Image (cartoon, helix red, strand yellow):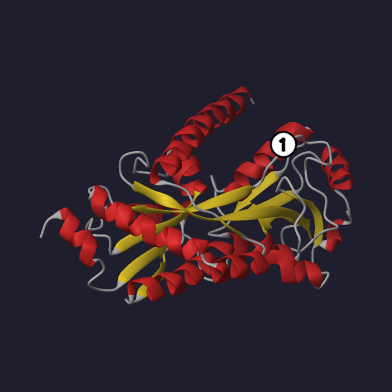
Amino acid sequence: MGPLGAAESFPSRPVRLVVSFPPGGATDTIARELAQSMKSIWKQSVVVDNRPGAAGVIAAENVSRATPDGTTLFLTTDGAITGVPFLPGVSSYDPLTDLKPIGLVAGIPLILVANPSLGVKTLQQFIDLAKSKPGQIDYASGGTGASHHLSMEALQRQAGIKLNHIAYKGGAPGLTDVLAGHVPVMWVAVSTVLPHIQAGKVVPLAIGSLERSELLPDVPTMDELGFPKFEAGNWVGIMAPPGLSDALAQRIHDDLARATASAEYKRKLTAQGNESRTSTTAEFARRIAVEYENNKKLAASLAAAAREK
């Protein structure tokens, strides 16, 4: 059967949706909502396969080696594609050649939160405290190179503060330690931390979207707080193994676009604090290329700064 015929009959067996983070986090939640939507469209099982670790490297490498028949797909955030590849000794794949872009499916705004024990209630109070204790305040992230990490690196540079990075295998386990008071602060997905904010277990300091969240209307944006156009968040997209035919890639893209355009999918993501997004394959590929180059420059800058110490 040729590529077009394979695309027309796809999928003939269950599809594995590989996720680079553990269960319970924002990415996993989106994966499960998408899997349900795709199951309805494809009339075939879509199984979420969590493969956490190394900020997405384990999952990305697994997909890059999979058979390019469309039954193994990678639901990934930007970190594994445009951030982690620049960390020395971490990644053995080239995201520009070893994975094939399909399209965007969601966005995950991040929010800066602190354990109440830190004693701060505003972003400025946190910055002032950090300046008084350079290098003494820890922060959690979902892994080196993940958006939680890069967002805090950007804040440190712009605010003139120095924090100590504690990397976890995902945002959810990092937040667990913030809630327990083992680590005082982190950028984390709104959808992951929302119930804990509502319960008063963490203090929201600023949101990383350019507009205030409907779910947390009293939390100011970074832009409002004097950091123009500062954004902290993830895009979530689907990628496939290299070698997937263009015809099959287009079929999968079109089906994903149907799922993300549905009112039910949008409603569920919005209720969680996430966003429904879509794109053409070409738009997604261009976004990856631009962010890849920007983060390459950032990584070089961070490396240079480390050598100067």
Q: Dot 1 surroundings within 10 Å: few (below 14), some, or many (20 or more)?
A: few
Q: Secondary structure at mark 1?
A: loop
Q: Is residue 57 left or right of residue 245?
A: right
Can see residue 202?
A: yes
**Left or right: 12 with respect to 20?**
left
At x 22%, y 50%, the residue is: 245
- Farthest residue to the left: give it: 1
Residue 296 to residue 20: above or below: above
Q: At 37% across and 57% down in the image, what residue appears?
A: 254
Q: Quadrant of the rendered structure where residue 39 is? A: bottom left
At horizontal 76% and vertical 61% (from top left) the residue drawn is: 214
The image quarter containing residue 131 is: top right
Q: Is residue 226 above or below residue 198?
A: above
The residue wearing badge 1 is 229
x and y, in percent, of residue 283 in the image: 45, 41
Q: How many discs mark residues in the rendered view?
A: 1
Q: Is residue 87 visible?
A: no
Q: Quadrant of the N terminus?
A: bottom left
Residue pictured at 44% horizontal, 36% vertical: 286
- Picture coordinates of residue 59, whole percent (x, y): 39, 57
Q: Position of residue 150 (x, y in %)?
A: 61, 42
Camera-side residue: 202 or 274?
274
Q: Nearer the viewer, residue 291 or 281?
A: 281
Q: State the image coordinates of residue 274 (x, y, percent, origin top left).
A: 62, 60
Q: Which one is nearer the viewer's eye here, 308 or 65?
A: 65
> Identity of the amino acid at label 1?
Lys
* Rendered position, 39 above or below 185: below
Query: Is 244 on the left-hand or right-hand side of 158?
Result: left
